[in-house]
Image (cartoon, grey):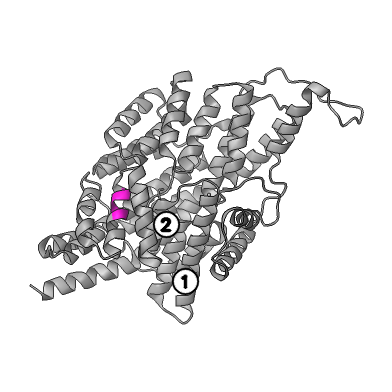
Amino acid sequence: MSPRTNDSPRGSGGQDAPRPAEAPEASTARSAAADAPRSPSPAERVDALRRFAAAVRRGRGLHGASCAVLLAVAMTAGAVAVGGDGRDAARAAPGVSRAVGADVLVRGDLDTAIRSLQAHVRAQPRDFGAWAALGLAQVERARTDGDPSRYARAERALARSLALRPGNDQALAGQAALAAARHDFAAALDHADRALERNPYSERALCSRIDALVELGRYEEAGRAATVADRRRPGVPVFTRYAYVRELRGDVPAARRVLHRALDSAAGPADVAYVATALGNLERGQGRYGTALRHYARALAADDAYLPALEGRARAQAADGDRAGAITTLEQVVARSPLPGPLVALGELYEDRNAPGDRAKAREQYALVDAWTALARAGGVDVDLDTALAAADHGDTAEALRAARAEWNRRRTVHTADALAWALHRAGRSAEALPYARRATATGYRDAAFLHHRGMIEKATGHDRAARASLTAALELNPGFSPLGARAARAALKELEAAR
């Protein structure tokens, strides 16, 4: 933790009122450090989100402040909330690791860290470093528990740090992480650059700079940023980002080597869980399900509650034919963190099983996606990519297209190109979709869902030979990439072969 500044002593002798000069500061500290006196349990959050989804379905006229208030109540389950708020949907956001800093982790338990930091800033309200650490801890916790109301608390803590020490690199790096979590990657890049002007060796800022460039589609710059970060601060947070940049360029062997290097250097359970999950995700994407499951097992041995590892294991189980195990695992995940990715995956598994009641269960998962995106949007998070991906297959295709176009106008990545291509296709505009589908696969990044989307669009536009190649490539790369998508790809290939 950063060295304390000259703290004023607290009053004693049972007198509640501090000296007049300290009153505004102490009041602000108490308020900002105690936004939520009681955090709801995961079960309470999910139940509240279900009730909110039902309320939206019953009364679609909810708007503005009324919606924001209802959302805040939903996600805080009655706790006091001031303000409110929410990897890429197709990949996991960087997990909690040493990038957060030892001062935040407090032996790896973010909840303990947050409570400890809140107590500390109440006692030492002028410790700008502790305020910055608290803000970053809230960002990281929101990304793992799916509670976007934490972003507003993070924003206030970081603002307090900057008020105490203008321009300090810890708070600027925290603002970069917060902007990235809210999917404002242009702002994230700006904050990261400002932090690096102050401290060129800030690990958090170096990592956020890579993340921002990747999510803006500036892959060559991201590669250079990863090389700089590796030179300045080699370690798990940088290694994993370097690996992802290599994967985006189609160099899976290099990505695998770097991740193994990162796993070898992992010093604690949080790092082991994070890197082993990243390796599991990489191998699952290549159709190597047994290897992926071994990596997820290692991650869960380090941290048996690590949600990205549980989600990855469920997806690998489904791809490997263990649908019952996948459903059980995903039900555990969404009961604790109802994020769009696992909700859609669970809904599709229910549809694929198609037992009595499964259709209704699937619809409930998709309704929860809508509720979560409404919550996140009310808290300032850009959720257009999540909306486009979910709505194209399981919702309003017009809304999917609107969201995909909006996201494409903000950032041009392989993921936004794929989302726009698929939204256009699902809206019956396959000829417009084809250039975007080709762009999504142009960097060398190999993703079975992207190849499936491209193949279906090529089939719809009469490019049968190309469609056969794309669909075959998708199923050869990762034959269980999606229970519904893989089935559709096989059916489309059968039609194409019959038409030859």
| Residue 170 placement, left or right of 382 | right
Going by the image, does 444 lie left or right of 141? left
For the point 58% across and 37% down, the residue is 155
Could you say which quadrant of the image residue 11 lies in?
top right
Placement of the N terminus among the 4 image quadrants = top right
Marks 1, 2: nearer the viewer: 2
The mark found on residue 30 in the picture is: none
Secondary structure of residue under mark 2: helix
Q: Residue furthest left?
A: 500
Residue designated by label 1: 363
Magenta stretch bounds: 415-420
> Is residue 230 placed above or below 485 in the rendered structure?
above
Q: Is residue 412 visible?
A: yes
Q: Which mark is residue 387?
A: 2
Q: Residue at x 62, y 62 (%)?
A: 48
Alpha carbons under labels 1 and 2: distance apart: 15 Å
- Give the quarter of the image for residue 200: top left
Q: Tell which residue pokes out farthest to the bottom in this image.
A: 356
Answer whether residue 418 is magenta in the image.
Answer: yes
Which corner quadrant holds the C terminus? bottom left
Q: Is residue 66 above or below residue 230?
A: below
> Does residue 257 appear in this view?
no
The answer to whether residue 3 is above or below residue 491 is above
378 and 342: which one is in front?
A: 378
Count of numbered tags: 2
Secondary structure beneath disc 1? helix
Which kind of residue does numbered mark 2 sit on?
Thr
